Image (cartoon, coloured by chain):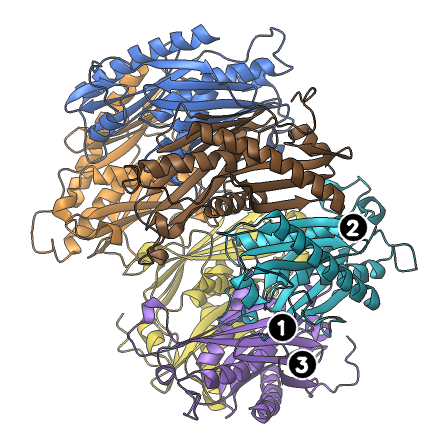
Chain colours: A orange, B blue, C brown, D cyan, E purple, F yellow
Amino acid sequence: MTTTARPADSLRTWSIDPAPFGAAPGRVLVKAGRTIVLCTASIEESVPPWMKGQGKGWVTAEYNMLPGSTSPRKGRDRGPKIDGRTTEIQRLIGRSLRAIVNLEALGERSVTVDCDVLEADGGTRTASITGAYVALVQALRSSPGFANGEPLPLSDSVAAVSVGIVGGVPTLDLDYSQDFAAEVDMNVVMTGGGRYVEVQGTGEEATFDAEQLAAMLSLASRGIAQLSILQKSLL
Amino acid sequence: MTTTARPADSLRTWSIDPAPFGAAPGRVLVKAGRTIVLCTASIEESVPPWMKGQGKGWVTAEYNMLPGSTSPRKGRDRGPKIDGRTTEIQRLIGRSLRAIVNLEALGERSVTVDCDVLEADGGTRTASITGAYVALVQALRSSPGFANGEPLPLSDSVAAVSVGIVGGVPTLDLDYSQDFAAEVDMNVVMTGGGRYVEVQGTGEEATFDAEQLAAMLSLASRGIAQLSILQKSLL
Amino acid sequence: MTTTARPADSLRTWSIDPAPFGAAPGRVLVKAGRTIVLCTASIEESVPPWMKGQGKGWVTAEYNMLPGSTSPRKGRDRGPKIDGRTTEIQRLIGRSLRAIVNLEALGERSVTVDCDVLEADGGTRTASITGAYVALVQALRSSPGFANGEPLPLSDSVAAVSVGIVGGVPTLDLDYSQDFAAEVDMNVVMTGGGRYVEVQGTGEEATFDAEQLAAMLSLASRGIAQLSILQKSLL
Amino acid sequence: MTTTARPADSLRTWSIDPAPFGAAPGRVLVKAGRTIVLCTASIEESVPPWMKGQGKGWVTAEYNMLPGSTSPRKGRDRGPKIDGRTTEIQRLIGRSLRAIVNLEALGERSVTVDCDVLEADGGTRTASITGAYVALVQALRSSPGFANGEPLPLSDSVAAVSVGIVGGVPTLDLDYSQDFAAEVDMNVVMTGGGRYVEVQGTGEEATFDAEQLAAMLSLASRGIAQLSILQKSLL
Amino acid sequence: MTTTARPADSLRTWSIDPAPFGAAPGRVLVKAGRTIVLCTASIEESVPPWMKGQGKGWVTAEYNMLPGSTSPRKGRDRGPKIDGRTTEIQRLIGRSLRAIVNLEALGERSVTVDCDVLEADGGTRTASITGAYVALVQALRSSPGFANGEPLPLSDSVAAVSVGIVGGVPTLDLDYSQDFAAEVDMNVVMTGGGRYVEVQGTGEEATFDAEQLAAMLSLASRGIAQLSILQKSLL
Amino acid sequence: MTTTARPADSLRTWSIDPAPFGAAPGRVLVKAGRTIVLCTASIEESVPPWMKGQGKGWVTAEYNMLPGSTSPRKGRDRGPKIDGRTTEIQRLIGRSLRAIVNLEALGERSVTVDCDVLEADGGTRTASITGAYVALVQALRSSPGFANGEPLPLSDSVAAVSVGIVGGVPTLDLDYSQDFAAEVDMNVVMTGGGRYVEVQGTGEEATFDAEQLAAMLSLASRGIAQLSILQKSLL
């Protein structure tokens, strides 16, 4: 949890690597500082019953934190009621991916991307989105429909980063201790081409002005540009 | 559900009135065009067990659409699993209110604000927030702690409006047919003083650029200023 | 909650009016004193899978109290388990309606009547039944099968009222304070033609004799006759 | 399922015997024709937390049909949602018992009566109530508070029977085939002293008039008088 | 619950009798000392949708303890979550039966065996398996496919018994007080022909050596041979 | 999934390494061929309310397969009902650990061991137990009570392996393809000292004789001896 030397406008150290375990056709381990997420993508050559016959595919995501990813231990999301935060995050990941997928070109196929947090030090949802894109591409390439060099049904790449106001300073890519101290917390999802997919800024028990909003958006844009390059280098 | 003549940069017709039914100390009927939401606020002179003894209060919200608020009928949110959309909306309403409540000054009291949609024509979550603030003030004034002219534990007012890109045009306060057609949908929550509380922009199967974002934020800011005046007129 | 001047053998002030909000084809606001219920009826031109091909329709009901309908606030019926009282009431409303509907003449259509209590001051289930009948008629008239003056698939009207023994006195149409004090509580559902549909008398921690039963049934019969006239005046 | 020779105004063959198995202090096997119910009553020398310190006791009931009690097999009431019919019946049994129990005289004790249907041929809820009373008495006598001849905290006995209109004929104690064919079905609960505890008459898809109601109540009264004698003979 | 005189290598007194109640085609009451289980078997002339068209049948089991089977009362397995112990036991019963059923020869039929414990004094799962086999045979003989002397789709009979180490002594057929005191508890399921179906030995907070394991297996084998003879005598 | 060259009496290649991610004080990655399980152990300096004041601790386990651990994808164990297989496995892991933990010497502490399967190729429950022991030791050493060289509250080590009959051949440490083909499947848990903790042999739709049982137990004993050495080498 050392964040000492990093300037407020710099990303943490990020890496995206093929995951050394798992059986899903798409699988990467994404690291953002001490946050480590396993993103796996599975593909089925069919769609749910209610989508049959429309010639369109579907992309969905699930998010989960492993109990050992935090200390003290995080209880599992079992039982009748999934935690509201979990629901929000997995809906966000799914929307972010669908924004750059051409569902018609995907055809009657379903992709499920699973983001399982192995270690949590802030920014797990943005690391998830950034890794999920890479796993999605891997899974698509394993499908009979796209395995032989056919163009992938994607209009662009997608990545995400968090920004915030910490002690009055607009800050990029917050780790847990920064996130905990932040007055404002914002998650930004953008395409490789620099267009917005999602902007979610929130000031729990606080507010922010237009200038701060602009500063955060600018930091996010620069961070995501770097992450987009990292994604491309792997694919 | 035709809203033909309204310019893209104008609010629908809004009203906030005391609700003619209900037993909760705070209760208003908020109308935004054909969207009608009953906001009631109840107050308890205690906090949940896990907050006891901290000298702080709590504010939470629940959101619900009545089955008859839409045609065809909307099924109730009963059973083991609350719909993800419902969870997201009620968390947003709660955060928006807490952004302007001083929980220490509230003392060991709990306020629950219920937003029950009686008729749905787009923008139910922003109408809920805008009405919830008024019901919250009413409920606080009914509490022994604030009934005799004591200053309310509020730092500002809060209101919300939706904006979007419809057919390429930045548009304020979308009704259902506009929302359905929109490329981008954004909900903005701001204080009466003009500071941001939440900014949630999303492009399901679409994206947006920085210029469009700026245009939407500008429209939202103007709309919310008008709604803040409407709120003040009632209180 | 003032019940001062009303004689024990008189109804409270009742009204049934078209609801000024909602999108369901049938919708009324029924008031019995301070008890206010929104009854909406929705119709689908199909039946559940297990009823297909039998040439019969189905009528069902749901009942709910809004959190702001009482003070202190009533918690929502969410989560894995619906409250036993709610289940009993909505089954009663459904049976009462089906007693006067000819399901064969209805054809393969489904009607769902929703009774949402906006303010609760006793007798919510009997107000619900009385209003549900009116909403049902409105919804039927909106269906392609009955919109052009075809005879409705109804054998009679149906209405309901509560009676009880309060301080030894047989009493009609109990409000909450009377219900709370009552030794015996009875709900009676009858047709416009004066036939019984349901008789449910119960003495929680008390009992009653044949004479008291007869007195209560007589009061109920008179009250329901008045409510049947009120229903007819609206339709 | 032979009901041939029995006159419409006669009870089926009933018996109440000590159950030859089980570990609960109260346990009887009640038979009404081919309907067989195991009623067990357990007693705890404490009350639920929310009743502590009031000097009062509590009596509650649970009802269940064993899968092998019917053919075809009846699925178990497991899973998130208890069947509405089950809920109604167990609430009815509990209220019926509490009507003759003096909860203050019971003291801070809890009695749970379980009615498990071993074979179902109509009238399981009324057989349950009739047997539950006997099991309750047995359990009370096993409690330190009442084991040495102290007066039991009961104001009377309680028993129940079903009545109905079958093919136009008022009929007592319906078996399954009669119940299935009945136009009107009524359950009546009365004390040994002849006072009403519950009257629940219902005409699913049918109605009934005052004369039929009187005939059914008269039959029920006679039947319950006989059952009360049977109960006394065992205790 | 005294079991004083019985030697450690002897079975308790066992009996298997036709159940005097219930409507399922297979039904027996199995007693092992004071443990009494009702085993009923129901048969359907169809299989679940996902098995259709494979020409195979299915056999499954459910296990349940009645609340009055123990003192103090055992709460019902209702609500969202079935107890882990219940799940384990009913899976064990189902596997034990399927080990001797030829599912192809059964044809597209489903058998459900229900084991409801009426009184519990240890060894309920092994009594359930031993009785379930007899109920299964009865149910098969009631099916049109096997009612006229056709060979049953069974390769052998199956029975079960518990063994354990109690106070250092290998002991057969433990009652509750022995089970409670046992260092090691083992359930053994075998065919009439003397082959193993399941061996489940467990030392909660204890361990056992190879010699003890051999002694327990030897006792179990002898006990099951006796139970197999008892089963045959009934069929 | 190649198992070609390995003799039937040999273990797969096993390793146990400190996990390179996670925040729990105990964490290892255990590999048995292509089966890879993350075992993390968390410790709390308190016990659940119902154990308070007894001077004893508690050890429990949870088991989970990640969706990407298999292909096709394995659905998550969310929702109202945990899968029966999951329940059985996590109860087995917990019992196996408690067999070698002295709960009194542990003191009022709780250890939760989480076994999350990252890749599944057979034997996930036995790999989980073998890894869980190592994570448990690591977590205990991190506790204030045992961090300074105090003796750990453990009577021995514990490890597990699967054995079975595959094509008639007693086989050690089955991978998925062997497990799928096996006539008999047995899981054996033993201490480092060579004593049995659990023996669970099962022949779904098959049976086995005493000689086969002896052969399997012999193989298991040898395999576990090797795994115990591997565990010791790490600690």
In the displayed structure image, the side of residue B184 where residue B42 appears, left or right: right
Between disc 3 and disc 1, the foreground one is: 1
Is residue B9 visible in the rendered structure shown here?
yes
The three-letter amino acid code for the residue at tag 2 is Ile
Indicate the position of residue F192 as horizontal and vertical percent values: 54, 70
Q: Residues within 10 Å of mark 2 (few under 14, many from 20)?
A: many
Q: Which mark is residue D34?
A: 1
Q: Are marks 3 and 1 in contact (CB under 8 Å)?
A: no
Q: Secondary structure at mark 1?
A: loop
Q: Is residue C52 above or below residue A5?
A: below
Task: Indicate the chain on which mark 2 is placed.
Answer: D
Residue marked by disc 2: D100
Q: What is the C-alpha distance between the residues marked 1 and 2? A: 28 Å
Indicate the position of residue A117 as horizontal and vertical percent values: 37, 45
- Name the N-terminal-most of marks 1 and 2: 1
Indicate the position of residue E193 as horizontal and vertical percent values: 50, 93
Q: Is residue E149 above or below residue E187?
A: below
Task: Indicate the chain on which mark 3 is placed.
Answer: E
State the residue in front, A164 or C147.
C147
Residue marked by disc 3: E32
State the residue in front, A173 or B149.
B149
In the displayed structure image, the side of residue C231 where residue E77 appears, left or right: right
Q: How many marks?
A: 3
Between disc 2 and disc 3, the foreground one is: 2
Q: What is the C-alpha distance between the residues marked 3 and 1? A: 27 Å
